[in-house]
Amino acid sequence: MTDLWPYDGSCDFQTLREEGWKPRPINEYIFKIQTRCNLNCDYCYVYNLGDDSWKSAPADMSDEIIAASANKIRDHALSHGLGGVGISIHGGEPLLRGIRSVENFVEIMRAGLQPLAVEVSMQTNATLVTEDVARRLYDLDIHVGVSLDGDLRANSHRLDLGGKSSYRRVVAGISNLAKFPGLIQGALAVIDLENDPVSVYESIKELGFTSLDTLLPHATWEAIPAGKTADRSVTAPAPYAEWLIALYRHWSTQEGRIRLRMFDDILHLLLGGENSFESVGLGPTQLATIESNGDIELVDSIGFTYAGAADTGANVLHNEIDEILEHPGVICRQIGADALPESCRRCPIVDVCGGGLISHRWDAVNGFKNPTVYCSDMYRLIEFIEADLYQRIDVQLATA
């Protein structure tokens, strides 16, 4: 393990507790029930950004691990007074071994989590979704998210293991999911600067999705994203802001627009809200990942930054969930602005930006205590949305 921040003693549990800080319990869990996939997306943090931990992990999550996870999560939730938890099924591709493996997971998990309220979701590439699979997912009463970057051209990164486009199979799967009301939760689209943002939005909307989450490509100060430079100032080139602002201009004027999580979260925070998704805001992160071997890990996307970055040393067979609340990697995602460098804490939009996704702050000098590699993009985007918001408020007040 690195001795860089937060593993340099800055996030010591005992010290923080003596100062009055208390951790928040974990209330959302990502389960890697399959560690293999039938696609080979070139931007995938699991397979193509240097995290090789999947190679030594079991391909499938065993019933023993599922049951042990449910027991530990239930005990953790009840001891902290939580009435319910969120369970998100991920992979690899969760449907790689068929729908029965998903059904089995949900049955064991729900039984083990009683009497908690349980909200189950699943993220899939949809290539294996037949009408029968969709019907059985519907019967499980779960919400399904689909990874899709837009139309055929925009999905050039999402190829199968033979190097062929997955787009038509994805669309066929989406069509099957759409036959069952409320089954589709939303689309995840990774931003490619070569793709037209309006076209991406409209193509996903036309497929029947009611929400979209646009994701910045995973990158760090050690692996600068396409179109960016090593300039850390807020005035640096901001091509991702330009892309997102073009999308916002279109989205914000549309009647019947679908939910766009990044924009909705930014607007919510600008209006005084406190909670949001992990990529924006200063709210505490209450998320953990359970790997196929039972390891309890930090947010899984952090694993591409360096070998072992997601490790906590805990496993559901031997440890309680409470134990990871003392881990620096959990603490640093719950202490708000104290997790950020001085330059971020002085920034006028820090309450909204929140320093960005922690994975995007990594470098080999300061660890994770840096501005996000998308600092200038976040600054320019939030500044633009804030100006637009207050202009709309002024217009409404003037016409009231």
Image (cartoon, rainbow, N blue to C red):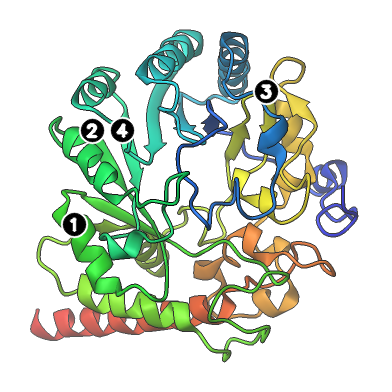
Question: In the picture, which quadrant includes the C terminus?
Answer: bottom left
Identified by mark 1, the residue type is Lys
Judge whether residue 287 can be spotted in this image. Answer: yes
Q: Amino acid at mark 3?
A: Asn
SS under mark 4: strand
How much space separates mark 3 and mark 4, taking CA atoms? 25 Å
Measured in 3D between alpha carbons, the distance from the residue under mark 4 to the one under mark 2, in whole angstroms, is: 5 Å
Q: Identify the amino acid type marked 4.
A: His
3 and 4 marks in contact (CB < 8 Å): no
The residue positioned 54% from the left and 89% from the top of the image is: 237
Q: Nearer the viewer, residue 262 or 41?
A: 41
The mark nearer the N terminus, 1 or 2, is 2
Relative to 69, is 155 on the left or the right?
left
Residue 85, given in percent of the width and then of the height, sits at 47, 28
On residue 183, the disc is 2
Q: Which residue is under mark 4?
A: 143
Query: Disc 3 designates what residue?
Result: 293
Q: Which tag, 1 or 3, sits closer to the chain's start? A: 1
The residue beneath circle 1 is 205
Give the number of the disc on residue 50. none
Residue 382 is situated, as x and y percent measured from the top left of the image, at: 43, 77
* Comes first in the chain, label 4 or label 2: 4
